[in-house]
Image (tube, helix red, strand yellow):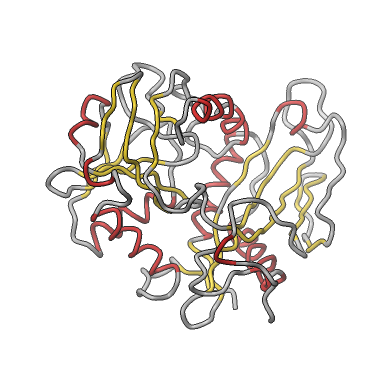
Amino acid sequence: MEKKNYDWANLDFSYRVTDKRYVSHYRDGAWDEGSLSDDPNMTISECAGVVQYCQSCFEGLKAYTTKDGHIVAFRPDMNAERMANTAKRLEMPVFSKDRFIDAVIKVVKANAAYVPPYGSGATLYIRPYLFGSGPVIGVAPSKEYQFRILVTPVGPYFKGGVRSLNICVSDFDRAAPNGTGDIKAGLNYAMSLHAIVTAHKNGFDENLYLDAATHTKVEETGGANFIFVTKDNKLVTPKSDSILPSITRKSLLYIAKEYLGLEVEEREIYFSEVKDFVECGLCGTAAVISPVGKIVDHGNEICMINSMQGMGPITKKLYDTLTGIQMGQIEAPEGWIQVIE
């Protein structure tokens, strides 16, 4: 299929309408068969659960053109499982793993012309989402839902591509203990908008959130998990019940141990330790890994010695290995790559 006429190498991370999207409706206790739609717009009740009580969740994954010309998606089964856990927590009906993966395949195939070519640096971002579409006026779960997937070609998440970010310690709390920080609920991200806008106004790229209970332990940013590297090249990442279980982070930890032979530690990280690390990165589907050069705590600057001018040596190896797996340059662990066509 002939590709669309984009300047692929210079795409930013923004929404572009594509030809098809996947839609399935939940009514009378069951999901319908689902289908592809030409219409990028939707009509829902003014009293829909998503509008009145923010009953919604979403996922994010990507499709790539590999070195040998195949179109593939990265670990969609993990996104399906995470969305199922989120749906249960928000009292929404689960869209099964098999149907989730099948829907991803259908919508990517239907938009194959929008999958950026190999080597362009761009990808096809896949956004599955689930929300309450039926009318609800009392505080209760909706009785009707929609599961949808849109896709859009994107470039780097942060403006300027891969560069060292300056982040600040936030005065706001991202998630409470026993709250919804470990699920991908839309409201979690709405609550972070004021904090990120404030950070941008103050000249920072992102926020570092501390745990809400003690304000002493590193959690995550508004949209990515942290990874740190010690002076002796150990990979350390925060462990908490109130951060999102990132698929990218989980993949990077496996790569660090099994591909690079690094020691890996997932544990509570006290903010007082951060000054002793030499590399820091933000990891997630959209950015993969973005290096952090400086963390500012109310005027006190902490510099990451090895990631001040871009990725440090360890995060660069992690990035190159993961993207190499995604692009078909490096053999993937079993089950990580879903071939679409």
Q: Position of residue 124 (x, y in %)?
A: 60, 62
Front residue of 91/287: it is 287
Towards the viewer: 172 or 183? 172
Q: Quadrant of residue 302?
A: top left
Q: Is residue 214 above or below residue 207?
A: above
How many marks are shown on the rendered structure? 0
* Quarter of the view holding residue 33: bottom right
Please identify the quarter of the rendering in which residue 308 is found: top left
Q: Which residue, as the protein is rendered here, is positioned at the far left?
A: 232
Image position, residue 194 (x, y; %): 58, 24
Query: Residue at position x 62%, y 45% from top?
Result: 58
Quadrant for the C terminus in the image: bottom right
Left or right of residue 265, residue 35 in this image: right
Q: Nearer the viewer, residue 155 or 23?
A: 155
Residue shown at 34%/64% (left/top)?
320
Q: Residue at x 53, y 26 (%)?
A: 201
Residue drawn at (76%, 49%) of the image: 30
Image position of 1 (left or right of 168): right
Looking at the image, residue 206 lies above or below residue 27: above
